[in-house]
Image: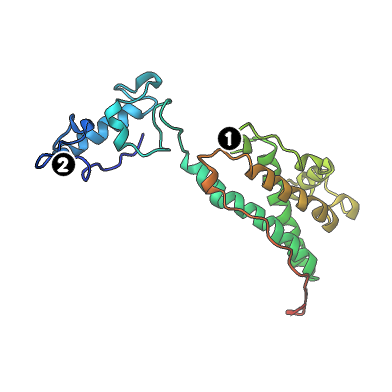
Amino acid sequence: MARVRSPSRRCYGVGGGSQSPPAWCAPFPDYEHHRANVELTCAVASSPGGSRSGRGGQSPPEWCAPFLIPGIVLGKDMTKSIDTMLEEILNEHLMYELNQLEDSLYIVRCCPIWFITNAAIESWCVHARSLDDFFRNIRSKSDDVTAEEVTSPTYTARFVTKIDRNLRIKINKQIAHITRGRTRESADRVTDRDMERATPLFLNEAEAFGKQIKPEYAPAWKWQRRAPRPTISMIGGVTIL
């Protein structure tokens, strides 16, 4: 349902002296006394399943236009809908996945402590798998969100498709699931080399994706590629540049 902008300053009280109120004030010249009815009428009318004049995908009454906030769910002919959950995914969750992917690789580069390195590798794998599904439009659950939902034209991955698909198999077998395919062999595990090769492709994909985001969602996309960071060494709790 659409949100309605308060028109009290534009309609209520206008018309004093020789000035006439705007024509769209006619249905509610004393707006403050009819606030709930006006907001409900415009909101229901603009809803795709509205029971009034917006029913069946029609535009809401013309006099509703000044009270409806552009970009919220309106009639098909007036503006485009905004899904606030998709905005949150772009602004927070997707950015988190990308940043964690980079940070996990950075820890692996810098830390020689095996259990910290292992944790960072597993962290990288989890985020790589999520991003791979997102950019390649792979859904395993009905509520999964993918790149095609916020892009125009429909987004088609062009960089993550270059990642060796054996890496995805490694992640599934060695990290995400306990299977008979697990192995002790280092060659069959996810390595820092796998991470080094794949991470730039994920970042390239994110840049390409950002250029295709629909205009109504573009303000929510604030991710930017980070500048390269110097490699450091962490030994015995001491950081050495």
Whole-Å distance between the Cαs marked 2 and 1? 43 Å
Residue type, label 2: Val
Which quadrant of the figure contains the C terminus?
bottom right
Residue 155 at x, y percent in the picture: 66, 35
Whichever of callouts 2 and 1 sits on the residue coming sooner in the sequence is: 2
Element class at badge 2: loop
Element class at badge 1: helix
Residue 189 at x, y percent in the picture: 84, 52
Task: State the residue at coordinates (21%, 46%).
Answer: 9
Relative to 233, does residue 14 appear above or below in the rendering?
Answer: above
Relative to 129, does residue 30 appear above or below in the rendering?
Answer: above
Task: Depth check: give the residue in front, 29 or 80.
Answer: 29
Counting the numbered discs, the total is: 2
The residue carrying mark 1 is 149
Task: State the residue at coordinates (16%, 41%).
Answer: 14
Residue 211 at x, y percent in the picture: 64, 43
Relative to 198, does residue 56 appear above or below in the rendering?
Answer: above
Task: Depth check: give the residue in front, 15 or 158.
Answer: 15
Residue type, label 1: Glu
Task: Depth check: give the residue in front, 169 or 80.
Answer: 80
Left or right, 60 with respect to 193, comes to left
Q: Quadrant of residue 10?
A: top left
